[in-house]
C-alpha cells in the first residue's frame, strides 16, 4: 500500500478482495474473492435503484416461486421502499421486516397465500451477492446534485449496504459526512429505504459502520483479532463475508423507539458467546461494563432464543424496580413484548401461560425452590467487577464468565463511556467525569 494513493486504487483493491481477480475491476492481487460477484460500473447505467427486479426475479424463480407470485411480491417490496408518506426510519423498518420475515402473497382468488422470502438467511451462499460500483442515482430534488456512492452491496438484487471510500490521506469522517448528506431528502434518501448498514473507510483507518441516519460521532469501528495488518483489508475480511454481513443484519439490528441501531462489537461477541452457552445449556456470567448496552444484549439474545428454540421461555429477573421498568421499556421500544409480573401470584400466572415467551420480575417475587426442582439455565448480567467476598457465590450460582469481559477502559477507548478521574486537593476530594 502506498500512502496517499488515489481513491480509485483503494476501491479497486476492495472490489478485488470481495469479488476476486475476475471482477472486471482494475487488477489487484491473485485472489478468489469472498463470495461476492462484480456487477459492474453503473456510472452510466440508467434506472439504478435499491431494488433491481432483473436480479431479484431470476433468484426467486430459481427458488420455485410462480411468476405471478414473484411479480406481486416484488411489487409489495417496491411499494414499501417508496417511502410514500413515511419517514426514512419507518420505510426502512417496513422493508426490513419484509426482508427478514418475507411477504405473504395470494396467487389468485380462493388460493392459499404464499410466503415469499427474498433472502436465504440460513444459507448465505445460496444468495446472489453482488457489488456494483459508481452507482449513479438521481436526486429527489431536480435542482440538487445527483449522487454516486462508491460501492453498493446487493443481495438478490436488493441494496443492503453502501460503502464510501477515501484515499488514505483523507479522514474517514469525510466519507461519513458524504453518506449522511446522501440521506438528506433533497438528495437520495429514497435509496436508503432498503439499506441496512452504511460503511465509510480508507486504507489507514479501515471501515466505520452505522445504521441509517446515525450521527457521525456514533459510527463504530469493528474490533476483532486478525492476522491481517492492513486496516481496510482486515475490516472487509471480518465484516463483509457473506456469513457475517447477513448475520449482522438478521440477528444484530434493532429498531429502538425511532432510532435504528446495529450491534457494537462487544455486544456481538457477548451474544455469540451466550448463544453457544444456550446451545450447550450451560449457565454463566456476561460481564460488560456499565454503559456498554447490556439491555440491548438481552434483547438480541432473547430474540435469537425465541426464534431458535420455539419452546423456550425467558424470565428476566432484576433486583431493583427501576431496572425492571427499564427492561420492559427497552424490550417494548424494540417491538418485543414483555410480560411484567406485578406480584408473586402474577409471576406464577405468567409462567403458566405458554403464550408469554418473555417475562420480567423483581427477584423477591421469584421465590425459592429446592435445587433439584429447577430446570432453568441461568445467565447473570453485570456491569461492575465482582468483589472477592461475593465472587465465588456468583460463580457458584451462574457459572463461569461467558466470552471475554468488556471492561471500563475498553469502553472508554471505544467512546462508549466517559472516563472517570479522581481529583484530590488538600481541602476536598471528588470524582469527576472527564
Image (cartoon, rainbow, N blue to C red):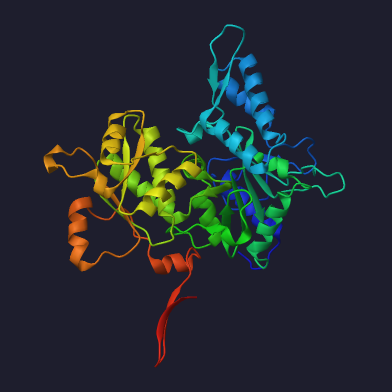
**x and y percentages locating residue 317 in the rendered image:** 30, 47
- The N terminus - image quarter: bottom right
Please report the residue visible at 24 percent of the width from the left and 67 percent of the height from the top. 387
* Residue at the limit of the structure toward the top, as seen here: 110
Above/below status of 69 relative to 95: above
Q: Horizontally, is 387 left or right of 31 in the view?
A: left
Q: How many marks?
A: 0
Seen from the viewer's position, the closer of residues 112 and 157 is 112
Which of the 4 quarters of the picture holds residue 80? top right
**x and y percentages locating residue 133 in the rendered image:** 69, 45
Confirm whether residue 20 shows in the render. no
**x and y percentages locating residue 106 in the rendered image:** 59, 14
**x and y percentages locating residue 393 in the rendered image:** 18, 58
Confirm whether residue 210 shows in the render. yes
Q: Horizontally, is 356 left or right of 257 in the view?
A: left
Above/below status of 310 relative to 69: below
Which of the 4 quarters of the picture holds residue 311? top left
* Residue at the limit of the structure toward the right, as seen here: 143
Above/below status of 188 relative to 82: below
Amino acid at each position: 500500500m502506498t500512502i496517499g494513493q488515489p481513491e480509485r486504487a483503494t476501491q479497486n483493491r476492495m472490489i478485488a478482495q470481495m469479488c476476486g481477480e475476475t471482477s472486471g475491476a482494475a487488477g489487484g492481487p491473485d485472489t478468489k474473492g469472498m463470495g461476492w460477484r462484480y456487477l459492474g460500473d453503473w456510472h452510466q447505467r440508467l434506472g439504478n435503484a435499491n431494488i433491481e427486479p432483473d436480479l431479484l426475479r431470476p433468484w426467486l424463480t430459481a427458488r420455485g416461486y410462480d411468476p405471478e407470485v414473484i411479480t406481486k411480491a416484488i411489487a409489495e417490496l417496491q411499494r414499501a421502499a417508496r417511502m410514500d408518506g413515511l419517514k426514512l426510519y419507518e420505510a426502512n423498518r417496513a422493508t426490513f421486516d419484509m426482508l427478514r420475515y418475507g411477504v405473504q402473497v395470494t396467487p389468485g382468488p380462493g388460493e392459499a397465500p404464499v410466503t415469499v422470502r427474498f433472502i436465504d438467511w440460513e444459507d448465505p451462499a445460496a444468495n446472489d451477492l453482488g457489488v456494483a460500483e459508481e452507482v449513479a442515482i438521481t436526486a429527489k430534488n431536480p435542482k440538487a446534485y445527483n449522487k454516486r456512492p462508491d460501492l453498493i452491496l446487493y443481495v438478490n438484487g436488493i441494496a443492503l449496504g453502501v460503502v464510501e471510500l477515501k484515499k488514505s490521506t483523507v479522514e474517514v469522517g469525510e466519507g461519513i459526512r458524504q453518506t449522511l448528506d446522501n440521506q438528506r431528502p433533497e438528495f437520495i434518501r429514497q435509496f436508503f429505504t432498503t439499506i441496512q448498514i452504511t460503511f465509510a473507510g480508507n486504507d489507514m483507518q479501515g471501515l466505520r459502520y452505522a445504521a441509517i441516519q446515525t450521527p457521525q460521532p456514533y459510527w463504530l469501528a469493528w474490533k476483532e483479532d486478525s492476522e491481517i495488518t492492513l486496516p481496510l483489508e482486515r475490516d472487509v475480511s471480518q465484516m463483509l463475508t457473506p456469513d457475517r454481513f447477513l448475520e449482522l443484519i438478521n440477528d444484530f439490528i434493532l429498531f429502538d423507539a425511532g432510532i435504528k441501531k446495529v450491534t457494537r462489537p462487544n455486544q456481538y461477541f457477548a451474544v455469540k458467546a451466550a448463544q453457544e452457552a444456550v446451545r450447550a445449556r450451560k449457565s454463566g456470567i456476561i460481564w460488560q461494563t456499565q454503559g456498554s448496552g447490556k439491555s440491548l444484549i438481552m434483547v438480541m439474545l432473547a430474540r435469537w432464543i425465541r426464534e431458535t428454540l420455539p419452546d423456550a421461555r425467558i424470565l428476566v429477573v432484576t433486583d431493583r424496580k427501576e431496572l425492571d421498568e427499564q427492561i420492559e421499556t427497552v424490550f417494548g421500544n424494540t417491538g418485543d413484548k414483555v410480560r411484567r409480573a406485578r406480584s408473586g401470584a402474577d409471576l406464577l400466572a405468567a409462567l403458566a401461560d405458554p403464550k408469554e415467551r418473555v417475562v420480567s420480575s423483581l427477584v423477591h417475587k421469584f421465590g425459592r425452590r429446592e435445587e433439584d426442582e429447577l430446570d432453568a439455565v441461568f445467565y447473570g448480567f453485570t456491569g461492575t467487577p465482582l468483589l472477592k467476598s461475593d465472587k465465588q457465590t456468583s460463580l457458584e450460582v451462574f457459572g463461569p464468565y461467558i466470552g471475554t469481559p468488556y471492561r471500563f477502559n475498553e469502553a472508554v477507548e471505544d467512546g462508549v463511556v466517559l472516563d472517570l478521574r479522581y481529583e484530590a486537593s488538600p481541602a476536598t476530594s471528588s470524582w469527576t467525569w472527564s
